Each structure stands twice: as C-alpha cells, then as structure tokens.
Amino acid sequence: MAEQLVQIMGRHRRDPLPERKPQWLKVKAPGGENYIRLKHMMKELKLHSVCEEAHCPNIGECWQHGTATFMILGSVCTRNCAYCAVAHGKPPEYDIEEPRRVGEAIARLGLRHAVITSVDRDDLPDFGAYIFAETIRQIHQRLPDCSVEVLVPDFQGNVDAIRTVLEARPEIYNHNTETVPRLFKKARPGGRYERVLEIFRTAKRLAPDIPTKTGIILGLGE
C-alpha cells in the first residue's frame, strides 16, 4: 500500500502544471468609481445601454473609462435574433422625452464622441426614426463639438425613415451587417442581406458626405 502511494505521488509530481489562462482573458468584476457614477446616472435619467441589456462582459472596463453605448426606444425588441441577449416581445409606448435625457447624460459626461443604438421597433409607423433624429439634435445642441454615431436598425428598408435620421446630420451612419447571406435566415430571421446593401446605397444617395459604417460578427459559422 505504501509503495502504491509513493508511486501515485511520484506520478503526480511529474505531471505538468495546468496551463494558466492568459491575463487578457480574465474580466474584472465591475465596481470602479466611474462605473458606479455612470450606473447611478443611467438609473437617475431612466436610460438604457446596450452594455447592460446585451449583458456585455466588458461593461466594467468600458464604464470605468466613461464609455457606453446608449440604447434608445426602450429595452424590448420586436425581433428575436439568435445571437442577441436583448429582451424581445411587445414594447411599451416609447418615451418622447428620452432624447432630451440622452443629451443631458452625454453633456454631463462631456463626451467627444457618442454612440447611439436602439432595439428594433417594427411596431412604430416610422420604426423609431424620429427618436433617433431628435436624439442627434439634442446632443448637438448641448455639445456642438461632440460627434454622433448612430447604429441604426434596418427600418425595414424604409427610405423615409433613413432620410429622417440623415437629415439630423449624424457624423456616422452605422448599420451592422452581422453575418453572411447563408446564415441570415438563422441568425437574423427578421432581416435580409440584400436589404442591408440597399440601406447603404440609399444612405449614400441621400447624404453622400456622411460616412457609412458596418460590422460583422465572427464565430457563427461563416
């Protein structure tokens, strides 16, 4: 018995130590001074962020640096994309005062660049375009030097909705492609790949001087 125990202990001593995870893979629990300040402000002004609603693991790092992506038009999406953690269902009526509060929050933070996104609002006649436009105007009114990037939904390709947002003069018009055509039906059942391309053609036709931008998710099997 004693010999077997020695053999087992000796074998364990020869086993290599488990490889440690790289430092960049570890995420610190949120809780810094700026994080707490921003969290209180968001609660006070009754605002939403994609950081919270989409359960982003980097929220602690970003909020500690005073960076957040504001999410307007509520926190309930009318679509149910397979990759997204934002709640979906029937949204309540939107808050007409929300753009003013977003402008106030950005002014308090003194941002030089603000990113505004939203849930999909297929239940609204203009798909939420007016609230986007008014939010841009409120930010520019309070902080004229702050550039505004809008990360908009597809508005079902509605040209009037796209025009409404562009006429408010955001510095960047952003719409995410998200994935390749083959995976669209599975990942974005409410979206169409050709519609995405047409959105950018429309935006360039309506406001050729406003830069357009897009993004794609990696890791879905593309």
Image (tube, grey):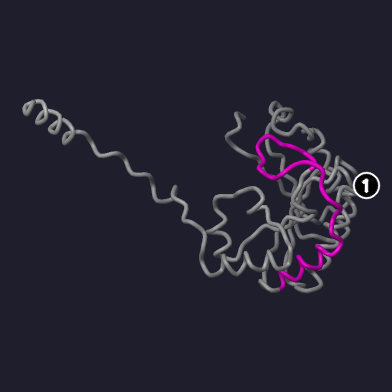
Q: Position of residue 206 (x, y in %)?
A: 89, 51
Residue at image position (86%, 40%) is 156
Is residue 116 one of those drawn in magenta?
no
Q: Mark 1 points at which residue?
A: 125
Looking at the image, residue 6 lies above or below residue 67: above
Q: Position of residue 49 (x, y in %)?
A: 68, 56
Q: In this view, does 200 lie to the left or right of 176?
A: right
Residue 65 location, quadrant: bottom right
Is residue 88 one of those drawn in magenta?
yes
SS class, disc 1: loop
210 or 126, which lies in front?
126
Looking at the image, residue 59 lies above or below residue 188: below
Q: In which quarter of the image is the N terminus?
A: top left
Q: In this view, does 159 lie to the left or right of 39?
A: right
Q: Quadrant of the C terminus?
A: top right
Residue at image position (77%, 39%) is 79
Q: Position of residue 159 (x, y in %)?
A: 91, 45
Question: Looking at the picture, which amino acid does disc 1 mark?
Answer: Pro
What segment is highlighted magenta in the picture?
78-107
Looking at the image, residue 1 lies above or below residue 49: above
